[in-house]
Amino acid sequence: MNKSRIAYKPVGLALGVISGMAAGVAFKQAWKVIGHDDDAPDATDEDRTWREILLAAALQGAIFALVKAAVERSGATAVRRVTGTWPA
């Protein structure tokens, strides 16, 4: 295992936690705008429609994937700046 991989492991773990928290906050804010409600529906919310539940799930997935990719790419770029090699 090269030094960039070793250096990236703890960075990647920390960034994963941070990205999860950031994505959760971003989703809550987006849902307030789109859903006109403070709480996003759960799959078992009896009073919510299928459309609303599936829209919330799709939006949450998209936001989490986008934030995760952005944070991981930033972390890998930072490791390359520090070590001179891309963590793979």
Image (cartoon, rainbow, N blue to C red):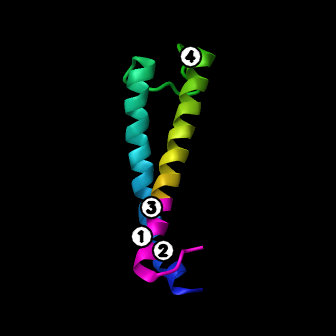
Going from N to C along the chain, the mark reached first, 1 or 2, is 2
Residue at 45% over, 50% down: 20
Which three-letter amino acid code belongs to the residue tagged 3? Ser
Going from N to C along the chain, the mark reached first, 4 or 2, is 2
Mark 1 near mark 3, Cβ–Cβ under 8 Å?
Answer: yes
Residue topped by disc 2: 8
Image quarter (top left, top right, bottom left or bottom right) of the C terminus: bottom right
Quick one: 26 or 80, which is closer to the camera? Answer: 80
Image quarter (top left, top right, bottom left or bottom right) of the N terminus: bottom right
Residue topped by disc 3: 74
> CA separation, marks 2 and 3?
11 Å
Residue 34 point in image, percent of width and height: 44, 21
Mark 1 near mark 2, Cβ–Cβ under 8 Å?
Answer: no
Q: Give the range drawn in magenta.
A: 73-88
Which three-letter amino acid code belongs to the residue tagged 1? Ala
Q: Which label is found at residue 46? A: 4
> CA separation, marks 1 and 2?
9 Å
Principal secondary structure, stretch drawn in magenta: helix
Which three-letter amino acid code belongs to the residue tagged 2? Tyr
> CA separation, marks 4 and 1?
46 Å
